[in-house]
Image (cartoon, helix red, strand yellow):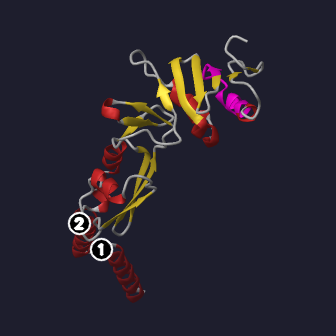
Amino acid sequence: MTGGGSMAGGLAGGLGGVRRPRWWHWCAMAVVLALLVWLVAFSSVLGVRTVNVVGTRTLTAEQVRAAAGIRSGTPLARLDLGAVRSRLSAVAPIRAVTVSRSYPASVIIKITERVPIGYRPIDRGQVVLVDPDNVAFRTVAAAPAGLPRLLVPAIGPQPTAAAAVAGALPGRILRALSSISAPSAESVTLTLRDGRVVLWGGTDRSTDKARLLTALLGRPGRYIDLSDPSAVTTRTDPGS
């Protein structure tokens, strides 16, 4: 019995020793953990080697990379994606941007560029392109074909009405326009390249008005009144 008890006690002690790692086990684990932290967060082993750019139209991938300001070799884990997005969002032609990591060594930048729906004249014959959000995002040497001139007040609140109406129009009608005049948000007028005039009124129900205008362009009449979509009128002169 005494021998059996000693054997059981020895076995229990042995198992207890297995469950309790020796101090050097903890040291080894700490070293491995430190190496992993260094590898991921501080070394260039998992650092940026390529920046892939998706979605460019008029910008080049090199222009986007330059604006992103990502240094080669920066550890992916420590790359400040928010700061990269902020730098890219400050680039006027970029409407939206997402930035993501792709291990082991890449960053993916997806951008959506602004699409012009009209232009405003500026100095020395140049014009600035405007998007549906009324953001002036690119200066060009001359008025582009197929876009209307946005006639808005030189002073006063930010003139968004002309851009909002232009953004609601299908491409075929937008290309047929010469100008959009918006002295106020409730008084928008479209002038077609063939001289016809459309009294648009306010920016409300612009989708309905655009649909009606598409149908009415094939009918006679030089003046189309869409200010009230439920009572559309056409006439041959302003006073008739």
Quadrant for residue 153, please give it: top left
The amino acid pointed to by label 1 is Pro
Viewed as shown, does residue 178 lie left or right of 109? right
CA gap between label 1 and label 2 equals 25 Å
List x then y, in percent, for residue 198: 64, 24
Q: Residue at x 58, y 20 (%)?
A: 188
> Which of disc 2 and disc 1 is earlier in sequence?
1
Nearest the eye: 110 or 135: 135
Viewed as shown, does residue 152 lie left or right of 198? left
Nearest the eye: 232 or 95: 232
User: Considering the numbered disc 2 on the image, is that residue within a helix, a strand or a loop?
Assistant: helix
Q: Is residue 52 above or below residue 161?
A: below
Q: Residue at x 63, y 37 (%)?
A: 173
Q: Which mark is residue 38?
A: 2
Q: Which mark is residue 21?
A: 1
Q: Which quadrant of the figure contains the C terminus?
A: top right
Q: Residue furthest top?
A: 239
Q: Which quadrant of the figure contains the N terminus?
A: bottom left
Nearest the eye: 232 or 68: 232
- How many marks the image carries: the answer is 2
The amino acid pointed to by label 2 is Trp
**Label 1 crowding class (10 Å Cα cut-off): few <14, some 14-19, many 20+?**
few
List x then y, in percent, for residue 214: 71, 35
User: Considering the numbered disc 1 on the image, is that residue within a helix, a strand or a loop?
Assistant: loop
List x then y, in percent, for residue 2: 38, 86
Stretch of the chain drawn in magenta: 199-213
Q: Is residue 72 above or below residue 214?
A: below
Of tags 1 and 2, which is closer to the observer? 2
Q: Residue at x 34, y 54 (%)?
A: 64
Quadrant for residue 167, please give it: top right
